[in-house]
Amino acid sequence: QGLFAALTPQAPDPLLSLIALYREDARPEKIDLGVGVYRDEAGHTPIMRAMKAAERKLVDEQPTKSYLGPEGDVGFVALSARLAMGPQAEGLIGVQTPGGTGALRLAAALVQSARPGGTVWLGAPSWPIHAPIFESAGLKVCSYRHYDPATGALAFEDILEALGQASAGDVFLIHGCCHNPSGADPDAGQWAEIARLTAERGVVPLIDLAYQGLGEGLDEDAAGARLVVAAVDEALVAYSCDKNFGLYRERTGALFVKAAGSIDATRSNLHALARYMWSMPPDHGAAAARIILETPALAADWRMELDTVRERLNAVRQALAAAHPRLAPLGGQKGMFSLLPLTPDQVIAIRKDHAVYMAGSGRINIAGLTLESVPRFVQAFDAVLS
Ligand code: PLP
């Protein structure tokens, strides 16, 4: 028997099969609410203006492609830390990573090194890749309810209960903003309570900040994360630039760590673990994002374009919320995703009968809609409900 005979086939990513189905659908009115990338009114995922300009500058002026260290582009790390965490960025260790996924995987490896088999608390539902990232690093995942489908709101009491049950040194994952898949984020008072309890319990927050700027604004979207990190001695922030800079395939992100009295040991462990996993992160996206952040005119243009992205998402959200009573909760949710109150059969029916494509969970990508397509979508939604 060969080595690989022991392997069992893994299920393909269901969203990828949805893309294929959508592509084959000949109905011109079809609507794709599946894959989680931003789309403009015309259905395109654009390269942002400032990004194009920064990439041109990079191509013209980059002097070498020689190796960097495992921490990546240190200018990018410092500027993205400041963008995410504000002034307290100064006290954090930063390492550039291959996207937010790489940041989460490095965080998992660091926790596994510090506490083999340690526990990560994860709200349900969550981004489906979270649990396997932690489990494949050897950590244990404990689940609690994040979201109440009956109200479309945060299951705040459940979050507090989970924090109450967690032991000192457990890791507690929190989506920084624009929760994927529910769009249900804590409000300011709830963030304050989470920060207080996290500190009181000695729990180590792992903030997954993958959509900064797509909810209410760059600083507004990071406010909760900043509050929690400020309240504790030890924290992890997995940061992605793949959505807010439109970089997706360039795999651009960073892990920021607050390490109390163990700064040097933590930094050297992060560098070693990164070295064993990917040696150093891909450069291009981070170098281009650094050029934007260090060039005031490009930074201003980037912020302006990000404003239009956010405003478009919010306009579609409000239109959905106003169009149908069962969609009303979407008005109070944030970011690119929401969960519709549909059964798996209704999700199949809306695809087969109305050419509306979404994940089996009923998660929709708000950016797949426009103000023009909302009425048709709402009609289809109403039809499969009855
Ligand atoms: N965290 C969440 C909640 C996400 O939704 C995603 C991407 O979909 C990521 C992290 C990973 O982002 P990246 O593409 O930068 O790896």
Image (tube, helix red, strand yellow):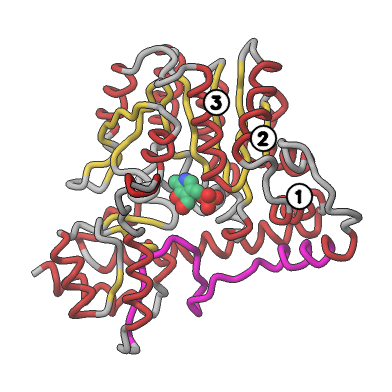
Ranked by sequence position, the earlier of labels 3 and 2 is 3
| Within-10-Å neighbours for mark 2: few <14, some 14–19, many 20+ | some
Distance from the alpha carbon under mark 3 to that under mark 1: 26 Å
In magenta segment, residue 318: no
- Picture quadrant where residue 337 is located: bottom left
| Within-10-Å neighbours for mark 3: few <14, some 14–19, many 20+ | many
In magenta segment, residue 43: yes
Image coords of residue 150 (percent x, y): 17, 47
Q: Is mark 1 within 8 Å of ligand 1?
A: no
Under mark 3, the amino acid is: Leu
Judged left or right of residue 221, residue 323 is left
Q: Is 80 located above or below residue 320 in the figure?
A: above
Image coords of residue 197 (percent x, y): 40, 18
> Which type of secondary structure does the marked residue at label 1 adopt?
helix
Which numbered mark, 2 or 1, is in the foreground of this view? 2
Q: Which residue is mark 1?
A: 290
Q: Is 267 located above or below residue 225 in the figure?
A: above
Under mark 2, the amino acid is: Arg
Q: Which residue is mark 3?
A: 110
Q: Nearer the viewer, residue 347 or 328?
A: 347
Residue 183 visible in this rendered orientation of the protein: no
Q: Please identify the quadrant where the C terminus is shown.
A: bottom left
**Range of magenta residues:** 29-57
Under mark 1, the amino acid is: Arg
Q: Residue furthest left?
A: 386
> Which type of secondary structure does the marked residue at label 3 adopt?
helix
Disc 3 vs disc 1: Cβ atoms closer than 8 Å?
no
Image coords of residue 153 (percent x, y): 28, 43
Judged left or right of residue 158, residue 75 is right
Q: Which residue is mark 2?
A: 275
| Within-10-Å neighbours for mark 1: few <14, some 14–19, many 20+ | many
The residue shown at (35%, 28%) is 121
